[in-house]
Image (cartoon, rainbow, N blue to C red):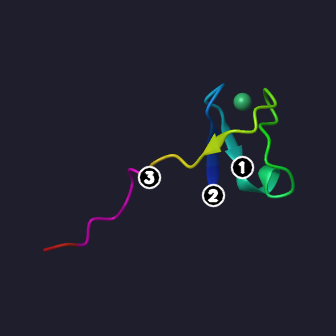
Amino acid sequence: MVVYNCIDCQKEIKFELVKKRVRCPHCGSKILYKPRVTSAVVDAV
Ligand SMILES: [Zn+2]
């Protein structure tokens, strides 16, 4: 699942909600960003 974060209220926003209109459903901000994934699988060595 792709989830974005609102730069204003920091809430998570599912991609399903922003693929139609890029806007935070919580505060109405149009600036969203994709949070850094920290749960990446380490497959080196
Ligand atoms: Zn927001």
The residue at the far front in this view is 31
Q: What amino acid type is highlighted by mark number 2?
A: Val
Q: Which residue lies under the disc numbered 3?
A: 37
Dominant SS of magenta comes to loop
**Beta carbon at label 1 within 8 Å of ligand 1:** no
Choose top left, top right, bottom left or bottom right for residue 32. top right
Local SS, label 3: loop
Q: Which residue lies under the disc numbered 2?
A: 2
Label 1 to label 2: alpha-carbon separation? 6 Å
Quadrant into which the C terminus falls: bottom left
Choose top left, top right, bottom left or bottom right for residue 5. top right
| Residue 38 coordinates in the image, percent (x, y) | 38, 50
N-term mark: 1 or 3: 1
Label 2 to label 3: alpha-carbon separation? 10 Å
Query: Magenta span covers which residues?
Result: 38-43
Could you tell whether 7 is left or right of 35 in the image? right
Is 41 in the magenta?
yes
Q: Which residue lies under the disc numbered 1?
A: 14
Q: Residue 44, relative to residue 14: is it above or below?
A: below
N-term mark: 2 or 3: 2
Q: What residue is rendered at 75% in x and 38% in y?
A: 30
Could you tell whether 27 is left or right of 7 in the image? right
Q: What residue is rendered at 45% in x and 49% in y?
A: 36
**Beta carbon at label 3 within 8 Å of ligand 1:** no
Local SS, label 1: strand
The residue at the far right in this view is 20
